[in-house]
Image (cartoon, grey):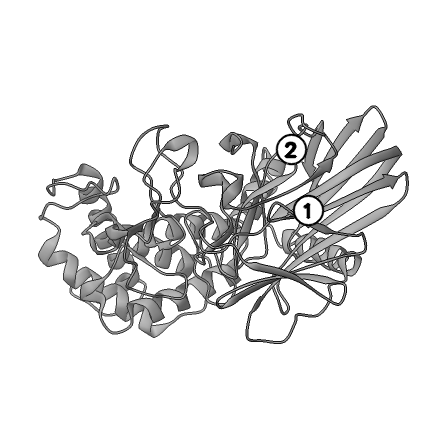
Amino acid sequence: MAGRIEDYALIGDMQTAALVCRDGTVDWLCLPRFDSHAVFAALLGTEEHGFWRLGPAHGDAAPPRSDRRTYRGDSLILESEWDTPDGTVRVTDFMPPRDGAPQLIRIVEGVSGQVPMRSALRMRFSYGRIVPWVHKVENRTVAVAGPDSVWLDTDVETFGEDLTTYADFTVRAGERVAFTLSWQPSHREAPAVGEPEAALEATADFWREWVEHCTYHGPYREAVVRSLITLKALTYAPTGGIVAAPTTSLPEEIGGVRNWDYRFTWLRDAAITLSSLLRTGYREEARAWREWLLRAVAGDPENLQIMYGIAGERELGESELDWLPGYENSGPVRVGNGAAHQLQLDVYGEVTEALHLAHMTGLARNDYASLLQLRLIGYLEKHWTEPDEGIWEVRGPRRHFVHSKVMAWVAVDRTIKLIESGDAEGPL
């Protein structure tokens, strides 16, 4: 059974993300991208749909929750500690910024005493629907199904039972035991064996250097930085797209049916994310998103979508996965999002505000961005009085929403400022 939503912590590599519960279970991970099929989908079903638990051995009892859990400094390196009758153990979970195959690394460290541990890994492909062929290649465990392969590397002995890969071992004070899970297209040669300790150091360096660029030094800085790290984790590094969330189908209310796939780039959400990054010194993310926007919209701004895929894809067809019961039986589970082609007039305001803020904070001028803004206003001038689906993405008759009208005004106001600045020409 999945944990409470608030018990999950996020780790990621700016291309995908995993959710780790307080009992040491990874219940959600899509590979190799945010919007790929899940390898672990127990979050939306049961353990039969894939999970990876790593923590103190617990026999037939429920797996114990960690006694302490925190991120290491200003990073996405998660540290969980258990106090047991035999001693204390720490598990460090992280995903190194990608340089080759995507990796999920888990390092067990003995803090005191000697603690019996168990790793239980149940890999399922296609959102828990496909049981892969699991076998050994030399000292590595590999799971293969169709186009996907996942490789497990560790120095401890593993064994298979009940379609699950286990490892039972004891960690003593000062000892460290590492597990590395890597994804690779199944037709390619095996990924290189990971170097967990070097990857840990490189990941810590990446986040330390990234946070050093933060220009915010006001109240609650620690919380602000943690929020910025989370937003950075939702960016898709290869393209600059930003996902609204790394998950699909977590319900708006338990038992409800408004369970949507949020692993796409909503222009509204991304624009608001960018405003937070820009106001705290992160111009590179804004530049990358602006380039992503120009590619996604291309030469067709009159058919602006409210969302696109993380590489700018337009077709996000929605379907239901009927073999998954949903989080706490809140079905249906959906992938794709049929709201992509809705009319949401407020999006024009959010996009224009983001472009305006980028301009005001010193981002280098882009002539096509200015032209795009003028063409968006040209469309809005003809359509702002129409009803739309609005920020709430209603799946019923279109209505007039005050929020949409206010944001249409924002779009016009920011474009007037652009023209007055001399960086564009238009009918003031």
* Residue 72 visible here: no
Does residue 143 lie above or below 115 as drawn? below
Amino acid tagged 1: Asp
Drawn side of residue 88 relative to residue 102, left or right: right
Q: Quadrant of residue 419?
A: bottom left
* Residue 137 visible here: yes
**Mark 2 neighbour class, 10 Å CA radius: few under 14, some 14 to 19, many 20 or more:** many
Drawn side of residue 213 relative to residue 156, left or right: left
Q: Position of residue 306 (x, y in %)?
A: 27, 54
Residue picked out by circle 1: 93
**Extreme residue toward the front, this view:** 162
Q: Residue at x 17, y 39 (%)?
A: 401
Label annotation for residue 23 = 2
In front here: 193 or 93?
Answer: 193
In front here: 259 or 368?
Answer: 259
Label annotation for residue 10 = none
- Tag count: 2
Does residue 74 lie above or below 152 as drawn? above
In front here: 364 or 344?
Answer: 344
In front here: 215 or 321?
Answer: 321
Q: Residue at x 37, y 35 (%)?
A: 251
The Cα–Cα distance between marks 1 and 2, rounded to whole angstroms, is 13 Å
Mark 1 or 2, nearer chain start: 2
Q: Position of residue 227 (x, y in %)?
A: 54, 42
Q: Quadrant of residue 135?
A: bottom right
Q: Kindly state the secondary structure of the residue where label 1 is placed.
A: strand
Q: Position of residue 105 (x, y in %)?
A: 69, 53
Amino acid tagged 2: Asp
Q: Kindly state the secondary structure of the residue where label 2 is placed.
A: loop
Q: Quadrant of residue 10?
A: top right
Drawn side of residue 73 relative to residue 382, left or right: right
Locate the C terminus and report the quarter of the image it occupies: bottom left
